[in-house]
């Protein structure tokens, strides 16, 4: 039974371009399928989460991160009786605009595009599904539903200061009122957004331990992690080798962390919804605050995990050194191609030169940013060699 405050199939607000809906799939199942078949989704397989793609086959990528966010989102949506398919598609699409080399790549593009409208991977995800994908007759993008686009636009909550592109897109969106940027998102979109953090903390902790950047003893300093580690260590590990024992304790610890976060989020959100007593999805949008949230105590514990990972993993010298190289490489690519768009491959070259002929440097630079944002780690490294190494043919 779908809750009254869930986004309902019969209340779907439609798509930017009119299409006949599927007879066998809901609008959001169709959105999900379009995301799964998109070029942008495939490239996530070779885009950095924390470790660059060539650093190891077992570390998370943007693709596996997105799949984990989707799995957790569906579980919570099901527990709350809301639209699982909508939560899933937002989770799967939320990182489609991410650059190669993770946040280091985004920092590089932000710096290189500072004078040309800036760069934000959340806005880029919207650009990917509304403009950059070119698969269908009659329109660019994937022509996702209004509800899916709303969830992507408000991934971090109401948009108080939209970028120039997002503001323009919102103003010309055919649905009256655009994407309602200043309101909160649906329950489903809020679920996908906070599950992004839950997945981050779980798999980054796992990858950090696997890579040797963190040890099990290190995480004892964080209360929630220590609680879960103590439980895992207290199990009967007789019969396992010391190596296998440590490996399984790591997994048991991480899954307990995720379970604690998910359980608290689900219970607290139930209480928040009962207090708000919404009768429709719009009641959630106009509530004035997020309804999907941790309890205050768990929010503090979640923040402690974030602080710990930032200090001990994201700022680890091995990660910082690789991030610095990534920023330099991507910044150089953006500067070279922005200054000389004739070096771009077709059809990107034709697009950028077309805008330059119109004296629209802002649009020409945006073409370059779109091209770079769509690169995989591997392609970006090869492109940097092609542009910088005289021994490599263009």
Image (cartoon, rainbow, N blue to C red):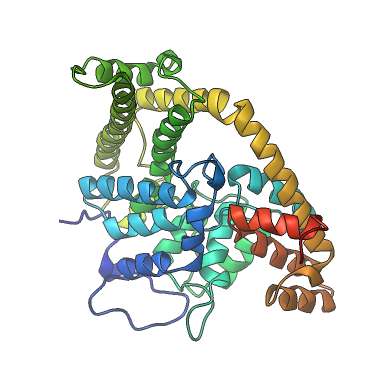
Q: Position of residue 214 (x, y in %)?
A: 48, 23
Indicate whether 29 appears above or below 60. Answer: below
Q: Residue furthest bottom?
A: 138
Q: Nearer the viewer, residue 272 or 119?
A: 119
The image quadrant where one finds the C terminus is bottom right
> From this viewpoint, is residue 164 visible?
yes
* Snapshot quadrant of residue 360: bottom right
- Residue at left 47%, top 75%? 16
- Residue at left 71%, top 41%? 325
Indicate whether 264 appears above or below 334. Answer: above
Relative placement, left or right, of 162 versus 251 is right
Q: Nearer the viewer, residue 206 or 305?
A: 206
- Residue at left 31%, top 49%? 71
Q: Position of residue 311 (x, y in %)?
A: 57, 23
Relative placement, left or right, of 17 versus 82 is right
The image quadrant where one finds the N terminus is bottom left
- Residue at left 53%, top 62%? 126
């Amino acid at each position: 039974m779908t809750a009254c405050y869930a986004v309902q199939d019969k209340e779907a607000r439609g798509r930017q371009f009119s299409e006949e809906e599927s007879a066998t799939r809901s609008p959001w199942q169709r959105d999900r399928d379009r995301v799964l078949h998109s070029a942008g989704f495939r490239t996530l397989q070779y885009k950095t989460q924390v470790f660059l793609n060539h650093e190891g086959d077992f570390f998370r990528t943007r693709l596996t991160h997105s799949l984990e966010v989707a799995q957790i989102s569906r579980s919570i949506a099901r527990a709350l009786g809301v639209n699982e398919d909508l939560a899933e598609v937002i989770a799967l699409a939320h990182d489609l605009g991410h650059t190669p080399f993770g946040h280091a790549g985004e920092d590089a593009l932000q710096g290189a595009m500072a004078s040309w409208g800036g760069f934000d991977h959340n806005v880029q995800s919207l650009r990917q599904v509304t403009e950059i994908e070119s698969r269908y007759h009659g329109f660019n993008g994937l022509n996702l539903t209004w509800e899916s686009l709303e969830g992507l636009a408000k991934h971090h909550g109401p948009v108080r200061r939209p970028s120039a592109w997002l503001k323009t897109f919102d103003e010309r969106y055919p649905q009256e009122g655009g994407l309602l940027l200043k309101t909160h998102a649906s329950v489903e979109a809020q679920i996908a957004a906070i599950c992004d953090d839950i997945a981050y903390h779980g798999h980054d902790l796992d990858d950090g331990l696997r890579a040797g950047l963190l040890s099990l003893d290190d995480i004892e300093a964080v209360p929630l992690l220590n609680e879960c580690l103590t439980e895992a260590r207290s199990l009967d590990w007789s019969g396992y080798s010391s190596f296998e024992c440590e490996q399984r304790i790591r997994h048991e610890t991480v899954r307990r962390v995720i379970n604690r976060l998910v359980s608290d989020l689900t219970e607290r959100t139930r209480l928040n919804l009962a207090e708000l007593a919404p009768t429709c999805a719009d009641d959630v949008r106009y509530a004035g605050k997020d309804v999907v949230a941790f309890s205050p105590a768990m929010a503090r514990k979640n923040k402690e995990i974030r602080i710990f990972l930032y200090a001990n993993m994201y700022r680890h010298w091995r990660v910082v050194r690789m991030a610095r190289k990534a920023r330099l490489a991507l910044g150089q690519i953006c500067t070279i191609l922005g200054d000389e768009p004739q070096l771009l491959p077709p059809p990107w070259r034709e697009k950028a030169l077309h805008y330059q002929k119109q004296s629209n440097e802002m649009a020409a630079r945006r073409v370059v940013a779109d091209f770079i944002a769509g690169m995989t780690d591997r392609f970006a490294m090869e492109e940097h060699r092609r542009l910088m190494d005289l021994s490599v043919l263009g």
